[in-house]
Image (cartoon, rainbow, N blue to C red):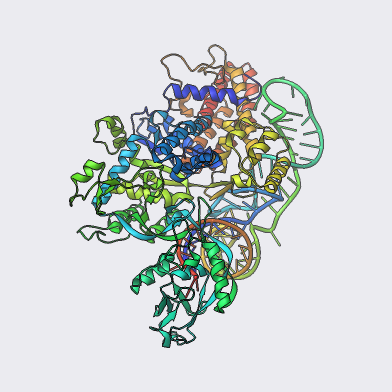
Amino acid sequence: MEKTFEPRDIEQKWYAHWESHGDFSPSGDGEPYCILLPPPNVTGTLHMGHAFQQTIMDALIRYHRMRLAPDGTRYRTLWQGGTDHAGIATQKIVENQLAAEGKSRHDLGRAKFIERVWEWKEQSGSTITNQMRRLGASVDWSRERFTMDEGLSAAVRRVFVEWYRAGLLYRGRRLVNWDPVLMTAVSDLEVNNEEKDGSLWSIRYPAADGGEGVVVATTRPETMLGDVAVAVHPEDARYSSLIGKMLKLPLTGREIPVIADDYVDREFGTGAVKITPAHDFNDWQIGTRHKLGPRVILTLDAKISDEAPEKYRGMDRFVARKSVLADLEALGLLVETKKHKLQVPVSQRTDAVIEPMLTDQWFLDLTSETRVDGKPGPGGRKAITEPALDVVRKGEVKFVPENWTTTYNQWLENIQDWCVSRQLWWGHRIPAWYDEAGNIFVGEDEADALAHATTKPVGALRQDEDVLDTWFSSALWPFSTLGWPGETSERAAEWNDFNVFLPSSVLVTGFDIIFFWVARMVMATLYFTKRVPFREVYINAIVRDAEGQKMSKSKGNTIDPLDLIDGIDLDSLVKKSTASLLIPQVREKVEKRIRKEYPNGIAPVGTDALRFTFAALATYGRTINFDLKRADGYRNFCNKLWNAARFVLMNCEKPGSGPRRQDAGANGEAGPEGEPRTRRVVLDPASAHAPVTDAEKWILTRLSQTLADVETHFATYRFDLVAQALYEFTWNEFCDWFVELSKPALNSDDDAAAESTRHTLLVVLEALLRALHP
RNA sequence: GGGCGGUUAGCUCAGCGGUAGAGCACUGCUUUCACACGGCAGGGGUCAGUGGUUCGAAACCACUACCGCCCACCA
């Protein structure tokens, strides 16, 4: 054995060996233990968050794979993996590639464009799975799935159709969050509210009869072109005489009424609010209450539409704002301009300001008591939302740490209907068809849709152009990956997985997707399988950099976990970190920081040390600040363990010196033919042999205590305590004391003591290796 | 406006009722037969503040001060 631990070759050799020998497929015959991998985006690369999360999952999986259940059987252990098609993100990457060629997706057409995305997916999809292999993730790759593969797409269609037929999916013309750059609807969750410095403008709307009228306050003056009323509080003495009177809407020549609605806050602004139902969520509701139809004055790309006065048509919304303000000023109607902080809705994907837009979309009903189509039957609240709350209330799904239950509950209790349609091309196309009269036909295919039709189609059918939200297929992941729907013969083998592995044991994921994913999986899985998707949800912390800053490419503070494993020199690191930074000043700053922070680049620590570091950092906290120095410490620990093994083998590898152990290094063999090397022996140090010396008795007692602690800490997901217990035992007790105490014993004339000590050294080492590197 | 966290050694964090712990950093000594990615010895904290409960509080309760995150329609 080498004097120092050189992980690289050893790790790669053994991973390949395990994978090729099917060691990652379920082989036990006892209770099932299953974890679903949160599917990474196909186009992505592994970041520290993935590496951290996957380390936890892999630790749990390997622990159960080798561990005996209380009844003496071995767990049937499955880590179900795969990747996500990531609709918007992937489409954007390919569109950017096209843009570099001076083309848009429309130049290619839908079919050609999708073909092109598939090509890109094939090319980039394996990147992340290979990175996972390098991290040692023991995913059962023979069961790898993709959210757009045939089986999962069939599941998506089935779910859509069943929900539709149950009256839970409906199509409607509603105000939705619209991304004018991507030209698609996005869900509430995909919108961030950012506080920005803006202005509050006060504008006079003169009375139609020539009176003073009222002054309204607004942060979006351009939308006045679509105003249909001005609202005041019903008990506001200042305006009570005006209620019901008409005002002259400046710049348009239209007349609009003053209405009373107690939504209005008398204290804010002037106490009078302009009402623009087509472009504001609140105004939409007020409009509905007062039966005032919307006036759409923006086009889908956020320019002023033909509904507005000719002068402004075709102007971008922000240009129009300036123009409107200038015109009001000229008319003497702009009363006041005040600085004002406001929440601006911004698209997570494009940073574009979101525009509430009136469009036809598909929604999943999550709020109604009864069916939205008026037929008898439960609505979404009863059929979908409440069961999801119920299983958590009853403890059938448990959050760890449990305070996340509150977050989950509060969101579900205040949930809105889910807009599931997206105006994109990459994704699951909506299985709905329209005839020339606008009738809707839904089915798994066109024939099925017609077979279930209640009206005769008028003219030709045309399939819906839109695709489903990426999270729609993600919501089905717990059962779609395991073979659901299982009636089809080609999925028979997977159907067996469904019966065995659903519900899975634990979901390991970040709190940032409790709403996007966790809650939706619970809802969908309960609805379609009557089972919970998983019994526990371990919410892992979010990985930040050493200063607690969020890691992001635009800050240049991301670390590639593989660079920690294999090391990277300074110049390459600088190049990599600044590659996507376009602003020269930012580039310079990032480069300077990196050269200061990593003057010698990053030294390789190996996969085991990185993973041990993650385990040691995995407390119940919600963020972890990743400090490279921590990894160095655990790299040293790996070396310590390596040398302990070296000491034991040097002293014990003599004929007749107790159980033989294979060299686990790069040159080692896998074990004798027919005798799998996997560690299936139950270790009971106390009964392994009769210890002779007091030192042996002591270390064996300490070993069994440590292993018991490890078991407890695994059961409560305290990976930091698992790591700490093993670290302290290995270093402070085994190495510092027992190995030292064994030296005189090994060299003494007392053969029985020497022999027994050798045995104990092997027993402890074997137990440690199994615990630390299952 | 609601909800959830955090404040412990220079740094990153455990501890959550019994007289302060880990890793890294620091100081001194040490290169002999597992390991200098090592060994031995050591320095360093009024556990954010105030009040309370208790024989005893970093830990439990209340309030305060900072810091952070999530949700929410104040134009």
User: Which corner quadrant holds the N terminus of chain A?
Assistant: top right
Judge whether residue A515 can be spotted in this image: yes
Residue A43, position in %: x, y?
A: 49, 38
Residue at (55% x, 38% y) in the render: A723
Asked if residue A711 is positioned above or below residue A249 in the image, the reply reads above
Q: Is residue B9 left or right of residue A209?
A: right
Give the quarter of the image for residue A306: bottom left
Judge by depth and name the residue closer to the eye, A229 or B29. A229
Judge by depth and name the residue closer to the eye, A270 or A739. A270
Q: Is residue A446 left or right of residue A351?
A: left
Q: Is residue A98 left or right of residue A482?
A: right
Judge by depth and name the residue closer to the eye, A201 or A192. A201
Residue B36, position in %: x, y?
A: 72, 28
Asked if residue A760 is positioned above or below residue A630 in the image, the reply reads above
Give the quarter of the image for residue A63: top left
Residue A10, position in %: x, y?
A: 56, 23
Residue at (73% x, 42% y) in the render: A596
Q: Is residue A520 left or right of residue A136?
A: left
